[in-house]
Image (spheres, grey):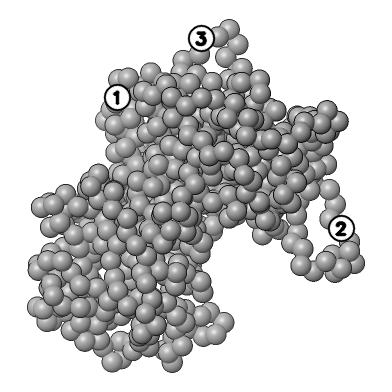
Amino acid sequence: MDGASADVTMAQVRDLQASLFPICTKGSFLNNLLNRTLRNSQIDINADGDTRQLDSKLRDVKEVFPLMKEVDCPYQAARWPMECQVLDDPVVHIHPTLASYSEKEPLYKFTGKEIQPKQVGEDSGEVIFKYYPISSVNYFCRSAVGGSACSLAHSSQDPSDLIFESRFESGNLAKVVKITSTYYELSLRSDMYTNRHTQWFYFRIENTKKNIKYRFSIVNMYKSESLFTAGMKPLLYSTKDASQKNVGWRRCGESIAYYKNDAPNGDSEDNPRYIFSFLLEFPHDMDTVYLAYNYPYTYTDLQDYLIKLKDDPVKAVFTKLRVLCRTLAGNNVHYLTVTEPCQEEDPKQKKVIVLTARVHPSETPSSWMMKGFIDFLTGDSLQAKELRNRFIFKLIPMLNPDGVVVGNSRCSLNGRDLNRQYRSVIRDAHPVIWHTKLMLRRLIEERQVVMFCDLHAHSRKSNIFMYGCEGKGHEGRKLQEQIFPLLLHKNAPEKFSFEDCNFNIQRSKENTARVVVWLMGVENSYTMEASFCGSSLGSRANTHLTIKDFEDIGQTFCETLLDYYNEDPRNEKMKLKICSRLMEQGSNAEQPKNIDISDYSSDESSTSVCEEIVDKLSFEEDVTSLTQLSIIVPPSTPVVPKRKSRKKKRKSKDCSTKIITP
C-alpha cells in the first residue's frame, strides 16, 4: 500500500471515529489505537488502494467499539439508540439523610380485603401517555448522545389529570390509560428489541393532588412470582420533600395486590401477564414525584461517583480508573483497580479479588452494594489499608450500561441476558463479556485470583445470600466454598442468610459468570444476591432493605475478607474445623446448615477471628481427620467429567444436574 492510500484509510477511520464518538476535550486516545483498529478489523485493501471494501466494513460499527479505550477521559454523556426520545433536563435525586436511614420501613401487611381490578383497556378509557421507541429494524443499529428529539407523548385534555413521563435515563413507562379521574392503568415497555422482561419501572408524575387516593395498576408485569406478594412496597420520591425536608426515596402504597391478568384483552395463556395494583396518596399538591421498582442508580450516577474518586488526590494514589471497552451503543465500561503501590521486590505476590455488578440493568441494589464496597476499600481505616496492602482489587461497577441507560430489566441492546453469555466467544455481539473474560484470563495467568463475586438482586426471595460452586471433587476441599458465606452471615446476621445460600450448579446456570470463572480455576467464585424487598432475620424481620443496608453489606464483605484471609497460622485450622462441623451437621450444596459458632465483630478493636472461633469450636481434634482435610491446591482449570447415562438419571428424578470436578 502506498503512502497516499494509507493516508486515505487513516482519514476515513478518524472520520468514523469522530462521528460515532465525540471526544472530550481533555481526553486522549492511546497512540496506537488506529493501528490496532485496522489490524484487528481484518480489512483487505487491494494494491490500487481501493477503499470501497474498507467503507463497507467500517459501517459495521461493532467491529470498532471494543477497541476504543479512553484512559484520561472517564466521563462520557450517555449514548442512546437513535429511536429513543430523551428529555433535555437530567433527573437528579438527593441521597437519603442519616435520619431516614435510621427508620425501619415495614413491609405491607395484607388484610385479605385487597381488591384485584381487571384490566379495562383503552377501549373504555383515555390514553394520556404513550411512548414506544420505534425502529425501522427490530435490532440495534445506531446510537447518539441524547437519542432523538422528543415529540409529544401526552394527549390529556383535562387540566386536572396527572401528567406522566419516563423519557429520561433508566426510565420505563410505555402507556397510561385513564379509566377514571383517580384510576390509571399503566403498561411498561419490554426490554428493547425483545417482547419480554417487563419488571423494572421508573417514571415521573406531575400535577399531583393531596388527600386523594389514586389507584395505579401496572397491567403487563412479566414474572409469575413477585415480592409484591410478600409485602414489598414501591418507592416514591417527592421533589418538595427533598428540597424542604431533605428526604429522599421512601416506601409507599396501600391495598397492594399482585395477580394474573386474565382479562379478555390480556395476553394469551402462552404468554401470560400479571397485574400489580396499589393505592397511593401524594404528600403535596402540585408536586413532582417519581415512582420506582427499587432505588435507581443510573449510568450518570456511576460516572459522577467515579470522577470524584479519580479526582481525590489521596485516593488517586491507590486507585486507577480505566475503560475496559465500549458497549454496542458506545458507552464506556469502566473498571477500577484498587491497591497500595507495591513496595516488595516481587509485585506478583499480591493476590487478586475481582468484583462485578449490574449485568442485569434493573438490579440496582448491586450498584449500591458495589458503592459501599468501594467506599470502604478506598477509606482511611486500618482495615482498608490492610486490604489494599495485601490484595489487588479489580472492580467493574456496571457491566451493562446500555441496558441501564434505556431502562431495561434484564437484557443488553442485543436482546440477550449477558449473564448467560460467558461461554460465548463472539466479541462483537457481547463486547463487555468478551473483555471481562479476557481480563480474568490474563489475571489468572499472571497472578493468583483468590475470589470472584458477581453482585445481583433477587426478585423472589428475602434477605441477602450467595450462590457458589460446590467443590466436592477436590480431596480435602469438601464444603470449603461455604466458609466465606458463613463468616459473612456471622458478620451481618440480620441481613445475610447463610441458609438461603446454594452451592449447587444447575445446567441452566452453566453459562453464568460464577460457573465459568470457577471453571477457569477460581475456586471461590460467587454470586451475591440482595433482595429487592427486605429481611426476615432478627430485629430486621418484615422490614425493607434500604440504600444504607446495601452499602453496609458492601462494607461487611470487605471486613469478612480480612477474616477469611487472616494471616494468623491458626486460620487454616479454623477453616478445617468449620468444614468438619458443617459435615457433622449434614450441610450440603442445596441445604447449607448454619453451625453454632461465636458471633463476632470485624471492627478494628476486635481480636482475631481465628482466636475467637477456634476457642469456641470445642470438639476433639483428630490427627487422622486433619490429614484427610489438608488443604490441596485445585488444578488451574477444573475438568468437567462426562455426564451420567440417562438410565442413571431416571433413577433419581429429584436430583438436579450438577457439575462435579475431579
In 3D space, how far apart are the residues under numbered discs 2 and 1 (Cα atoms)?
A: 56 Å
In 3D space, how far apart are the residues under numbered discs 2 and 3 (Cα atoms)?
A: 51 Å
Q: Is residue 176 above or below residue 190?
A: below
Q: Position of residue 74 (x, y in %)?
A: 35, 33
State the SS at label 2: loop
Residue occupying image coordinates x 20% and y 67%: 205
Q: Is residue 195 above or below residue 365?
A: below
State the SS at label 3: loop
Residue type at mark 1 is Asp
Identify the image quadrant of the N terminus: top right
Residue corresponding to mark 2: 644
Residue corresponding to mark 1: 312
Identify the image quadrant of the C terminus: top right
Residue 193 visible (yes or no)? no
Nearest the viewer among 383 and 267 is 383
Q: Is residue 538 above or below residue 195?
A: above
Whichever of callouts 2 and 3 sits on the residue coming sooner in the sequence is 3
Residue type at mark 3 is Gln
Residue 128 figure quarter: bottom left
Q: Position of residue 550 (x, y in %)?
A: 40, 47
Residue 118 visible (yes or no)? yes
Residue occupying image coordinates x 32% and y 59%: 105
Query: How many numbered marks have been drawn onto this rendered protein structure?
Result: 3
Residue occupying image coordinates x 34% and y 62%: 106
Q: Are marks 3 and 1 in contact (CB under 8 Å)?
A: no
Q: Position of residue 119 (x, y in %)?
A: 36, 86
Q: Residue 343 has which mark?
A: 3
State the SS at label 1: loop
